[in-house]
Amino acid sequence: QVQLVESGGGLVQPGGSLKLSCAASGFSFSTAAMSWYRQAPGKERELVAVTTPTGGNTNSADSVKGRFTISRDNAKNTVYLQMNSLKPEDTAVYYCNARRWLGAWRDYWGQGTQVTVSS
């Protein structure tokens, strides 16, 4: 049974930092591309950052470049999102995603963690 469990969300002031974690189980973590998405109220879910199975390549949305860093620890089956210089517009529910090729692309999602940036 595939599980993705996010943690680390919360309330932070503008300019602050948070580190999200996503613990994975039930599948071969080191074969999956891992991503963080977010969804703000009234908006569509958007891709924040992605890392390849080995962690050798990453990419992030222009809106978070230079502020957010995605990383993974395949020994711990965990992917992280370090978020610095947070802005009110970063407020959203952040979701962990795993994507694997099983003859077709298969996506798995976590339950989400709320990040609120406010003074």
Image (cartoon, rainbow, N blue to C red):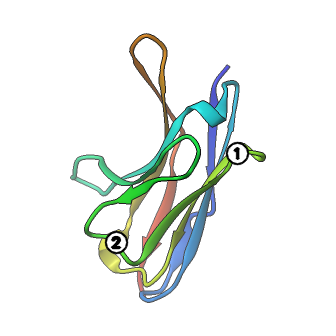
**Direction right: furthest residue:** 75
Q: Quadrant of the N terminus?
A: top right
Tag on residue 74? 1
x 56%, y 51%: residue: 55
Q: Residues within 10 Å of mark 2 (few under 14, many from 20)?
A: few
Q: Nearer the viewer, residue 10 or 81?
A: 81
Q: Which is nearer the N-term, disc 1 or disc 2?
A: 2
5 over 39 or under it: above or below: above
Q: Nearer the viewer, residue 56 or 113?
A: 56
91 over 15 or under it: above or below: above
Label 2, on which residue?
65
Q: Residues within 10 Å of mark 1 (few under 14, many from 20)?
A: some
Question: What whole-number distance in Å separates the C-alpha atoms at marks 1 and 2?
Answer: 23 Å
x 44%, y 71%: residue: 68
- Place of residue 119 in the rendered image (x, y in percent of width and height, measured from the top left): 42, 89
x 35%, y 60%: residue: 60
x 29%, y 47%: residue: 45
How many numbered marks have been drawn onto this rendered protein structure?
Answer: 2
- The type of residue carrying mark 2 is Lys
- Place of residue 44 in the rendered image (x, y in percent of width and height, measured from the top left): 23, 47
Per the image, label 2 sits on a secondary structure element best described as loop
- The type of residue carrying mark 1 is Asn
- Place of residue 71 in the rendered image (x, y in percent of width and height, measured from the top left): 57, 59
Q: Nearer the viewer, residue 106 or 93?
A: 106
**Direction front: furthest residue:** 56
Tag on residue 60? none
Per the image, label 1 sits on a secondary structure element best described as loop
